[in-house]
Amino acid sequence: MKHRLISMLTIPVVTICFGVISGSSAIAQSADTESAKTQSGDRDCSNRSIFGAYGSASQGVLLPAPGVVLQFRSVQMTRFDGRGNLTWMEHTVINGTPAGPGWTPARGTYTVNSDCTGMATVNTPNSPVPLNLFFVVVKHGTEIHMILNSDAVSTVFNKVE
């Protein structure tokens, strides 16, 4: 009888203990995963991660033909709508000569991946072909680092507060 009572109590006690240990382990794993995400900078991003006005400056070189290198500088004010569309105003100087007399409007589209990487395509009158851009979203969406895929031009966008 004594042996049967211990046997009857053992199964529920072991079940409860296993449940508590499993729950603690799941909580610890969840905390470890969140801690790892925070330390590595991983977070879920989307088109909504970049929204509003961003000021930027671009610099580098354009490589229009073999052996031809043109210095490039530009400043932009870009508005991201949080839904994958952008507009910008740019003033560009190529090899010391302004591309136009003032500000030039441009438009395009963008996609932000869940790992905070992304791509944009911009159509501007200052380029004979669409600009294909690759970027990363950093500092919780307040900064974007971008490169032009075809030339050696880089840009840092800073959110206008």
Image: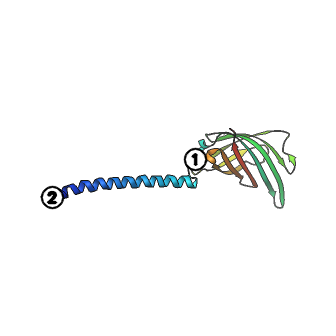
Dividing the image into 4 quarters, which one contains the N terminus? Answer: bottom left
Using the image, determine if residue 55 lies above or below residue 67. above
Q: Nearer the viewer, residue 126 or 101?
A: 101
Under mark 1, the amino acid is Cys
Residue at the spot 44% in from the left edge and 55% down from the top edge: 29
Residue at the spot of label 1: 45
Report the residue marked by disc 2. 4
Between 5 and 132, the one lying in front of the other is: 5
Q: Position of residue 43 (x, y in %)?
A: 55, 50
Vertical order, 151 against 57 (above or below): below
109 or 118: nearer the eye? 118
The image quarter containing residue 123 is top right
Rate crowding at label 2 as few (under 14), some (14 to 19) or many (20 or more) other CA atoms within 10 Å: few
Q: Quadrant of the C terminus?
A: top right
Measured in 3D between alpha carbons, the distance from the residue under mark 2 to the one under mark 1, in whole angstroms, is: 57 Å
Relative side of 22 to 40, left or right: left
Q: How far across and how far down the image is residue 100, in percent?
A: 84, 42
Identified by mark 2, the residue type is: Arg
* Colour option used: rainbow
Query: What residue is rendered at 61% in x and 46% in y?
Result: 140
Secondary structure beneath dot 2 equals: helix
| In this rendering, the label closer to the viewer, 2 or 1 | 2
Q: Tell me what residue is drawn at x 65 percent, y 49 percent.
A: 119
Mark number, residue 58? none
Q: Is residue 159 left or right of residue 1?
A: right
> Which sits in the foreground, 9 or 153?
9
Q: Earlier in the sequence, mark 2 or mark 1?
A: 2
- Locate residue 73, reporting x and y percent: 81, 49
Residue density around tag 1, few if under 14, some if 14–19, many if 20 or more, within 10 Å: some
Q: Position of residue 152 (x, y in %)?
A: 76, 56
Discs 2, 1 touching: Cβ within 8 Å: no
